[in-house]
Image (tube, helix red, strand yellow):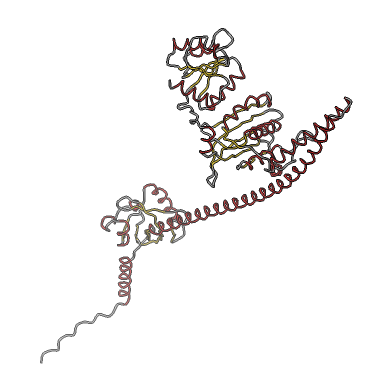
Amino acid sequence: MEPDAQSPTETPADPAGTSEALAQAQVSAILAIAADAIISLDETLRITLFNEGAATIFGYCPHEIIGKPLELLIPERMRSNHKRHVADFSQSPVAARKMGDRQEIFARRKDGTEFPAEASIAKQVVDGHKAYMVVLRDVTERKEAEHALAAANELLEARVAERTRALEAEIRRREEAHAALIQAQRMEAFGQLTGGVAHDFNNLLTIVTGNLELLGGQLDSERQAVLLKRATDAADMGAALTKRLLTFARRRRLTPQVVDVNEMILNLTQLLQRSLGEPISLTTMLAGNVWPTRADASELENAILNLAINARDAMPHGGNLIIESRNTVREDGGEFVQISVSDTGTGMTPDVLERAFEPFFTTKETGRGTGLGLSTVYGFAEQSGGHATIESVPGQGTTVNILLPRADEEATAAQTRAEPVPLSENCEVVLVVEDNPDVRELTMQRVEGLGYVVREAESGAAAIRILESGEDVQLVLSDIVMAGGVSGYDVARWVAQHAPQIKVLLTTGYAAEEAQSGPQSGAILRKPYKRDELARALHDALNS
């Protein structure tokens, strides 16, 4: 009988080994499927483990990086700090730490590019040797989303701020419009009141002056004549006041005509210089292409004179008075000529500024003002179809603007029937030669108002010295008869011989026969001349 086959030997189960294998398998699975980078380091900070997540993030294959120093994964600019942090962590009793709590950290890919990251590090001692485990996550997409969100928030905040500013500006505009409406209504009420008073007052003055005239023929003593004259003068002053009140109330009949504002200002300059006195410097800034306007010329002159005198009184210790002209277009498309009179005087406080246009309101001492100057200017501007405004800062000065409507082309053509006034084309230099200082100053201002650059000479001899010096001059505008023995003809003769490229325009106030007694050297402009005559003479002389 054959012996029974031997049964295979059965090995008893080993639970401890099975558990360790299972744990290793689970760790390997975690390392394989983890999206984060999991890296092990020895105590010299060389890489001993590099999972698939790390390979995907850094671009290294495990066999390329295992055994290499961790520094390869750290940007050069951060390596010294990283070493210090790891050394501190190695000596600390803490077993694990999240890196980047205090500042952002960055890692370095195989291609050298950097990316923001979050990392945690843990340490343990195995067989007496320290080992480290690092878990690192690429947070590029999250950072980009944060930056995009921050940018969107900034844009939203900017739009909200812009909308808020626009809303605030609209609120201010409406408040200003409302205040302007209230002021206009207030001024209209003043106008109706003062207009009615002025008309009634004129009726009373008519009775008073008429009876005074009748009494004049019945007087029989000098004493009575003196008393009558005092009463008549007082009645005349009352009539002047009512005239200004009617201007403010826009009930006075005006005689509008097409006006050249620049010409008017230049003609007033000499009068203003005498009225203002030495401590005050007068400057005119006149635009060369100012539109014609349609207004009562005498009332416009009075308005400018009124403003100049007010400015003088606001500068008791002297200062600067500037008269400007320019074109302006309002928001509603209306075209206006703006005349501005500015001073560097005491200025107005807000409460004074609010009442400045009111009739009889004045800040001057008793007896020095009627309070009708600015109100008359306001009424004239309104009745002319324009407007008047005031800008003032206490201690810095005041500017009063008169805006008058641009004259339409048909009205301008019907009144002037003339070509436009030719202005300077290339800012040519004109040498004004005149021995009368007042006439010379006025002529220089008129020539400057046409856009030319002006030089001056007080005599024929001085003019020749300037020309001999080689100063750049395109045209000589010279009076013919001058003191000093060198006439305008002599200057013209010198120019013809030594500088023929310079044009000459002679001017004189003498009779034609006397002016023609000398040699004819260039054109002659007869005094007195108007602005357009001067402009055409200069233009023709330069282009002859």
Horizontal and vertical percent position of residue 8: 19, 83
Regarding residue 364, the answer to whether it shows in the image is: yes
Is the N terminus in the top left, top right, bottom left or bottom right quadrant? bottom left
Q: Residue furthest bottom?
A: 1
Tell me the residue at 50%/29% (across/down).
421
Viewer-nearest residue: 523 or 131? 523
Up-down: is 280 above or below 121?
Answer: above
Where residue 47 appears, x then y in whole percent? Answer: 32, 56
Percent from the top left, x then y, of residue 43? 36, 56
| 306 vs 65, nearest the viewer | 306
- Classify residue 433 by image quadrant: top right
Asked whether residue 130 is in view, the answer is no
* Location of residue 284 by image quarter: top right
Q: Quadrant of residue 136?
A: bottom left
Residue 451 image position (x, y, % from top left): 51, 27
Q: Quadrant of the C terminus?
A: top left
For this view, does 36 lie left or right of residue 102? left
In depth, the one of 78 and 217 nearer the eye is: 217
- Residue 493 is left or right of residue 265, and the answer is left
Q: Is residue 270 left or right of residue 519?
A: right
The residue at 34%/65% (across/down) is 34
